[in-house]
Image: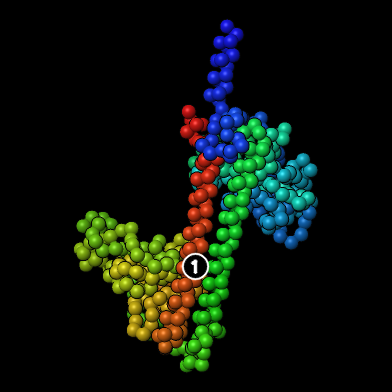
Amino acid sequence: MSSEIKTSATKEEAKSMLVPRLRFPEFRGVEGWVPESMSKLYSFKRSNSLSRDKLNYVAGSVKNIHYGDIHTKFSAHFDITQEFVPFINESEGGIVIEENLCAEGDIIFADASEDLADIGKCIEIVRLNEECVVSGLHTILARPMAERIALGFGGHLFKSRWVRSQIQKEAQGAKVLGISPTRLRNLRLPLPNDKAEQQKVADCLSSLDELIAAQARKVEALKTHKKWLMQQIFPCEGESQPSLRFPEFRGSRPWASDSLGKLFETTSGGTPSRSNSEYWGGGIPWVTTTHVNFGVITEADEFISESGLNKSSAKIFPCGTVLIAMYGQGKTRGQVALLGIEATTNQACAAILPAKKIDPLFVFFNLSGRYEELRRMSNSGGQENLSQGLIREISFSYPSDEAEQQRIVSCLQSLDNLITAATQELENLKTHKKGLMQQLFPSVEALEA
């Protein structure tokens, strides 16, 4: 009888264990991971309640991690020697006590988000360098208990699909979602009993994070270099000549300069009536400001018919037309794009049609580098907009020698190719990490089984 009971218990125990699809060789064949209640693994500490406007980047004795720092961070970890966060003056709040200071191994959660995919995002404190740090407004501070979790493992654990899916289910709210310590205590955390396995997983994923961070820095360095270069090879605002010319064109005649309205034909598009289905679903691409984002437009999401074209102010613009977003939400206004296809646009797009002896790509790159200038030109009022009149008044300088135009275009295209390749490599690394995370941690299907 006792033998039967022992066998039954062993089966139940085995059922509760989980085995990731991928384990390091030295841990294959050992017991599986066990899902444990977060309430047994983490306690919760008080967070700092001061808002962002009460913080400063100049001086203080205690630093503050804000929920925004968590939402914008890709890595699973926080290293005070690598992060730039503001100070909080202890005298302002009177709530900074030693017990509530962050410790290495702590997890800091963002407690609110409008996006379900972001709710409960977190970071693990892995290096404090003996500095005093608190978690700030709209954060939750969780501290590991009983030294069950290896330093560096928790940050990756809470980014795993297994745990993220539980956090999303525990979130509450309508427009703004929230998560609380009470709800987080309901989480079941899959954990290998051997801290050596935890450390191996953490080291593997952390090394990949370092590669991702290095690649991200490379992308930003290339973008910064391009921005600097464009400021040199195109005239600065208020000037008609560039500060840098390629060696073979130094000594050539100065660039010509005039207003866009005198150099190019400019116009805008139109929108056929949405209430007439005959105007839509045809074969003519129709572009909106959503597509105007500093690139070459080669496809559209919507299409209008010949009838829609003829019964509205929409016009077919040729390939090589430069578009400027005249208005739009957020950052849209002032953005530039180049049509790589024949297409119509809505009325929010200003169209600068191709002109003889001026390369359309030269026009595109020139105006792309003047984003802030274009936004400053916008009309003041309830909603700042550009207009056809303002666009036609924009001063535009260019070299009369088309070979110099093409030399500038070729240089910037080569740099864009480097940025595209580096960005793709960054995305490949992120995709690789996502796939590796799914292999190194138990699957969501195992959770639901």
In the displayed structure, would residue 80 be above or below residue 312? Answer: above
Q: Is residue 42 visible?
A: no
Please state if 37 lies on the left or on the right of 246 as rendered: right
Colour scheme used in the picture? Answer: rainbow
- Tell me the residue at 50%/55% (across/down): 427
**How many numbered circles does the render carry?**
1
Please state if 326 lies on the left or on the right of 205 as rendered: left
Which residue in the structure is indicated by mark 1?
A: 418
Q: Nearer the viewer, residue 159 or 431?
A: 431
- Tell me the residue at 44%/84% (across/down): 404
Q: Which of 160 and 319 is in front in this view?
A: 160
In the displayed structure, would residue 298 be above or below residue 182? Answer: below
Specify the amino acid type for callout 1. Leu
Q: What percent of the width, then of the height, locates residue 106? A: 69, 42
Crowd class of label 1 (few under 14; some 14 to 19; many from 20; radius 10 Å): some
In the displayed structure, would residue 92 be above or below residue 195? Answer: below
Callout 1 secondary element: helix
Please state if 347 lies on the left or on the right of 443 as rendered: left
List the single residue furthest toward the front: 25
- Tell me the residue at 74%/50% (across/down): 128
Q: What percent of the width, then of the height, locates residue 447? A: 51, 31
Q: What percent of the width, then of the height, locates residue 220? A: 56, 64
Please state if 42 lies on the left or on the right of 402 as rendered: right
Q: Quadrant of the N terminus?
A: top right
Q: Which of 255 and 312 is in front in this view?
A: 255
Q: What percent of the width, then of the height, locates residue 222? A: 55, 68
List the single residue furthest toward the top: 1
Q: Can residue 3 be seen in this view?
A: yes
Asked where in the image residue 407 lies, by quadrant, the reply is bottom left
- Tell me the residue at 52%/81% (across/down): 233
